[in-house]
Amino acid sequence: MPEPQQTPKTRSLREHLNRIIFEFDTPAGKAFDVALIVVIVLSVIAVMLDSVDAISIHYQHLLKGAEWLFTGLFTIEYLLRLYSARQARRYATSFFGVVDLLAILPSYLSLFLPHSHYLLTIRVLRVLRVFRILKLARFVGEAGTLRRALNASRYKISVFLATVVAIVVIAGSVMYLIESPEAGFTSIPASIYWAIVTLTTVGYGDISPQTPLGQALASMLMVVGYGIIAVPTGIVTVELNRAHQQSLLLAKCRSCGKEGHDNDAVFCKYCGNALGEAGDG
Amino acid sequence: MPEPQQTPKTRSLREHLNRIIFEFDTPAGKAFDVALIVVIVLSVIAVMLDSVDAISIHYQHLLKGAEWLFTGLFTIEYLLRLYSARQARRYATSFFGVVDLLAILPSYLSLFLPHSHYLLTIRVLRVLRVFRILKLARFVGEAGTLRRALNASRYKISVFLATVVAIVVIAGSVMYLIESPEAGFTSIPASIYWAIVTLTTVGYGDISPQTPLGQALASMLMVVGYGIIAVPTGIVTVELNRAHQQSLLLAKCRSCGKEGHDNDAVFCKYCGNALGEAGDG
Amino acid sequence: MPEPQQTPKTRSLREHLNRIIFEFDTPAGKAFDVALIVVIVLSVIAVMLDSVDAISIHYQHLLKGAEWLFTGLFTIEYLLRLYSARQARRYATSFFGVVDLLAILPSYLSLFLPHSHYLLTIRVLRVLRVFRILKLARFVGEAGTLRRALNASRYKISVFLATVVAIVVIAGSVMYLIESPEAGFTSIPASIYWAIVTLTTVGYGDISPQTPLGQALASMLMVVGYGIIAVPTGIVTVELNRAHQQSLLLAKCRSCGKEGHDNDAVFCKYCGNALGEAGDG
Amino acid sequence: MPEPQQTPKTRSLREHLNRIIFEFDTPAGKAFDVALIVVIVLSVIAVMLDSVDAISIHYQHLLKGAEWLFTGLFTIEYLLRLYSARQARRYATSFFGVVDLLAILPSYLSLFLPHSHYLLTIRVLRVLRVFRILKLARFVGEAGTLRRALNASRYKISVFLATVVAIVVIAGSVMYLIESPEAGFTSIPASIYWAIVTLTTVGYGDISPQTPLGQALASMLMVVGYGIIAVPTGIVTVELNRAHQQSLLLAKCRSCGKEGHDNDAVFCKYCGNALGEAGDG
C-alpha cells in the first residue's frame, strides 16, 4: 500500500510509538518490552493450563476470559506495530511480524474450529524477543555464528539427510517383510517410523523386533545409527571452528588495509610492510 | 560382450539417447531427469500405500496396476540405458546400474515369491540421482569429503567396532547369567541384542534388567556407552577438519613450487614472489 | 559478625584445627580428609539402604542409629569448620560451606517432615572434596578449563536453549491437537514432556504417537533432534579447543616480550633471542 | 620360576614353536593365526547356540562335545604358549596371557558351578588378535592414538564422571521423594538407576515419572543430560586432534636433530640452520 502523506504531528506520534514499541533504548521502550514478555509468558501458561482437564473444569471462565484479554491486547499491539513501523510491509513480512500475526489468529479461528486455540502456544516464539532486552548485539552475533555454521554446511547436511532417508526407507521395508504385524510392523510407513525411532536412538519400544533375524538387522541399524550420529556433529563442529577462527582474523595492515593475517605475523603478507600495533586481536 | 560395429545412424541415435538419459545439460535431458525422479517417488509411495491394509483393500487393483506400470517403465528405461551407455558393462556394474536392476527385479520375483514386491522400495536409492540435477559438482564434492573422512578413519573405526563387539558379547553373557528369562534375557544372543540396544542408547525397554545386580551392571554399561559415543564423533570431526584444511592447501607458488599458502595470500611466504594465477582452489 | 579478639593460645588452637580440617599437607590433615570421605560414603550408603524396603525392615534401628551418628559427626565437624575457618562468613557462604550445612539439615528436618531425611544423599556432594586429596591442582585446573569452556559459550548455549524451548512448546501443542488422550497426550504440558523426551532421544515410550500423522510429525521432531544434538557438542568442542590452545600460549620472550611461542621453542621466533627460563607453561 | 638350562635342541624346538605361535611372518605362523581365529569364532558361536533353548534341546550332546573339544585345544595351546614364550612369566601376566587363561577356566569351573560355562564367551577377546594378521602396525598405532587421547583426558573425564555421579544420586533421591513406588521408584538405588537410564538418554521406560512435578524434574534432567553429552565428546575430539597434530610434527633438523617444527618452517627454530630436505612429513 502507498504510504499516506504525513503531517508533522502524526509523524511525531508514529515516531514516538515506534521508539516505544520497536526500540528499547528509552525507559518507556524498556518497560514496554519487559511488560510484553511478562504478558506473553502469562498467555502461554494460560493456554497450557486450559488444556489440563483438572484445571480447566474449575477455572474455565477465568481462562477463557484471560485468553480473549491477551488476544485483544496482542491485536491492539499488532495494529500499533503496523501503524508505527517505518516500513509496514517489511515488518508484516518479517519473521517477528508473521509470528505476531500467528499469535492472535488461532483465537479468532477457534470461533469456527474448536480446539484450534491451543495453537496459541505459538506465542512462545514471541518470547524470543527477550534477546533484544538482554545484551542484544552479543546474542544476535552468536545466533548469526550458529546460522552461518549451519548455512555453510547445508550441502553436507543435504547429502547426509538423503542418505538417512534412503537407509530408513530400505530398512523399514526389509523389516516389514521379516517381522509380523503383531510386533507393530503393520505397514511399510509404520516400519519406516520404527526405523527413524531406532536410527535416532530414541527407541520408544512401542514397535520392536521379536524374531532373531529382525533383532540382528535392528542391531546393525543401531550400530550404523551410532556411527552416523557422528557425522552432523563433526560437520557442525568444523564449521563452528572455522567461523570462530575467521572472527579471530581481524588484525588490519596500516599500509594496505587488508585483514586476515596470522595471529603471530610481523610483516603484512600482502604488501610486505611491518604490521605494527595498528590492530590487536 | 564385444561392441557391435556401428553404422553412423545407430551411433547417432545411441548418442542422442545417451545425452537425454545420462546427461542433463540439454532441455530434453533435464526434463527426462525431473520426470524420472517424479515417477520414482510416485512408485515408492505406491509400494508403501500397498502395504497399508486400510488402503490396499480399497485400491488393490489401482496399486497393482501402478506397480506393473512403473516396473514396465523402469524396465524399458534400464534396457535403453544398457543400449545407449558408452560402456554398457561399466554402467551395468556401477552403483546406479546395480540399483536400476534391483529396482525392477522384485516385481518379477513377486510372481514366484509373494510379498517380495515390497522390496521395490529400494527404488528410493534411485532418487539419489536428484543430486545430479541440483548443483552436481558441489554435492559430489561434499559427498567426497564425507567419504574421504570416513575412509581415512577406517582403521580407528575398525579398532572401535572390535572393542564394541567384545563389550556387547561379554556384557550380554554376564547379563544372561544374572538375569532371568522372564525379564527377556532368554538366550545369549537375546542378551547381546539387549546390550547393543543399551550401548547405543536406543533403549526400547522390551528387555530390561530387573535384579539390583543386573541394574548395576546395566548402569555401568550405559556410562561406558555414554563415553564411547564420544569416540566415533571425535574421529569423524578430526578427519573432517583435516579434509577441510587440506582443501585449503591447494595454491602453489610458480617460483618455488611450494604449496600450503593461505587462501587469500598474494605473495609466496617462502620466496616472496607473487603467487599469480597458477593454481586456484 | 566481628572477629573476636584472639589470645595467642586460641589462635594457635584454631590455627591447628584449620590445618587439620582445611589443609591436607600434614599427616593429620591427610588422615582427616581420608576418614571424612570414608564416613561420607558410608553415610550416603546408609541413607540409600534405608530406602530399600527389604533391608530397612530388618535393620531399621541400626540404620536410624547410623543416620543420627553421622549427622552428629557432621554437625560437630561443621561447627569446628565455622570456628577454625580464617573467614567464617566466607566459608559459610562458599559452595562447600553451603553443602556442609545442607548435609545435616535434612536429619533435623525429618523430625517434622517424615521422609525428608532421604535428602541426606546431598552428602554425595561432599565427596567432591576427594579431588583435594588426589592431585588437587591438576583437577581444579581441569575443572577450571571445563568451566571456562562452558562459560565462554554461555551466549551460544542460551540461544540454543531458547530455540529448544520454542520447539518443544510448539511441537507439544500441535501433537496435543493431533493425538488422542488415550495415547498419553492428555494435556499440553504432558505433550511438551513427550516432546522433550523425544528431542533428547531418551524415548521412554510411556507416551508415543499412534496416528500416522502424529508419527510423521514425531519423525520430523526426531530428525531435528538428531541434528540439534550436534550444536552443543560443536560449541563445547570449539571452546575446549580454544581453552587448550590458550593454555599453550604462555611462554613469553624476555627480549621482545611477545607471547605465543610453541611449548618447545628455545629461540624467540620474532626477535631471534634465546627464550630463557622466564616463563614456563 | 627360574628358566631351566636349555639344550640346543629344546631351544630350537621352543624357538620354532615360538615363531609359529607368536609370530606371523612365516607361512606356518600365518596359517596358525588364521586357524586360531576361526576356531575361536566357532567356539564363541557354540557357547551362544548352547544358550538358545530351541537349539540346545536338539543338539545338546554335539554342543557339549564341541565345548570340551575347544577347551581341550585352547588348553594345549595355552600350555604351548607358556612353554615357547621367551619370557613365560611376562606372557602369563600380559593382557592376552590372562585372556587365554580366562578363555579355558569357565569350562573347568562349570564342573562345580553349573551355567558358569556361559562365561566362555570371554573368548571373544581372543579374536582381538585378528588385528595382528591384518596390517598390524597400523592398527596398533591407531589403537595407541585412541588410548593416548583417552589417557591425556583422564583428569577431565574424572571430573566429568564425579559430576555425573553427584547428579544421578541427588536426582534419584529427589525423584524417590516425589514419585510413588507404583511408578517404579521403589527405592533410592532404583531411582538412581532410573536417573542413569535417563541421563544417558537410554530411556527404557520400565520406570518413568507419572506426576507433573516428577515429569518437570525429569525434563530438566534430560536437558542437562543433553548438554552433558557434549562434554566427553568435546574432550575426546580435542585430544584426538592434538594427537593427530603431534603425529604431523615429524620433520627433523639435519643440524641439531630436533623434531617438532611447523609444517611450513624453513629454518630450524632450535639452532637457526636451514631445515633442507632431510625429513618430509
Image (cartoon, coloured by chain):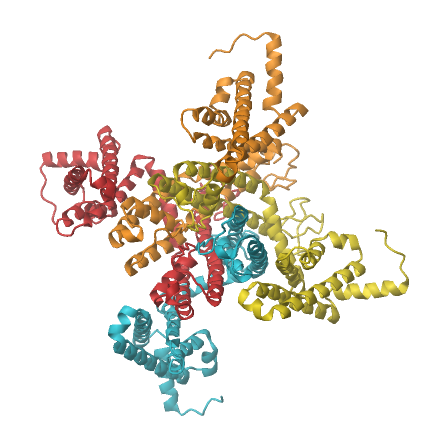
Chain colours: A red, B cyan, C orange, D yellow
Residue A39 is left or right of residue C27, and the answer is left
Image coordinates for residue D8, horizontal then vertical, percent: 90, 63
Location of residue D97 in the rendering, given as x and y in whole percent from the top left corner:
72, 56
Farthest residue, direction front: C58
Q: Nearer the viewer, residue B1 or C171?
A: C171
Task: Please tell me which residue is depicted at 69% across the width and 48% down the height of the picture.
Answer: D258
The answer to whether residue A258 is visible is no
Question: Image quadrant for the C terminus of chain D?
Answer: bottom right
User: Is residue B76 shown left or right of residue B169?
Assistant: left
Taking depth in this image into account, of B4 and D214 the one nearest to the observer is D214
Query: Residue D49 or B4: which is nearer the viewer?
Result: D49
- Does D73 sit above or below residue A140? below
Up-down: is B119 above or below A191?
below
Above or below for D213 versus C2: below
Q: Where is residue B7 in the image (x, y as percent from the top left)?
A: 40, 92
In this view of the protein, which residue sits in the foreground, C26 or B205? B205
Q: Can residue A101 be seen from the camera position used here?
A: yes
Q: How many marks?
A: 0
At x 39% / y 44%, what residue is drawn? D182
Q: Is residue A202 left or right of residue D243?
A: left
> Would you identify the image quadrant in which residue D60 lies?
bottom right
Percent x, y of residue A117: 19, 47
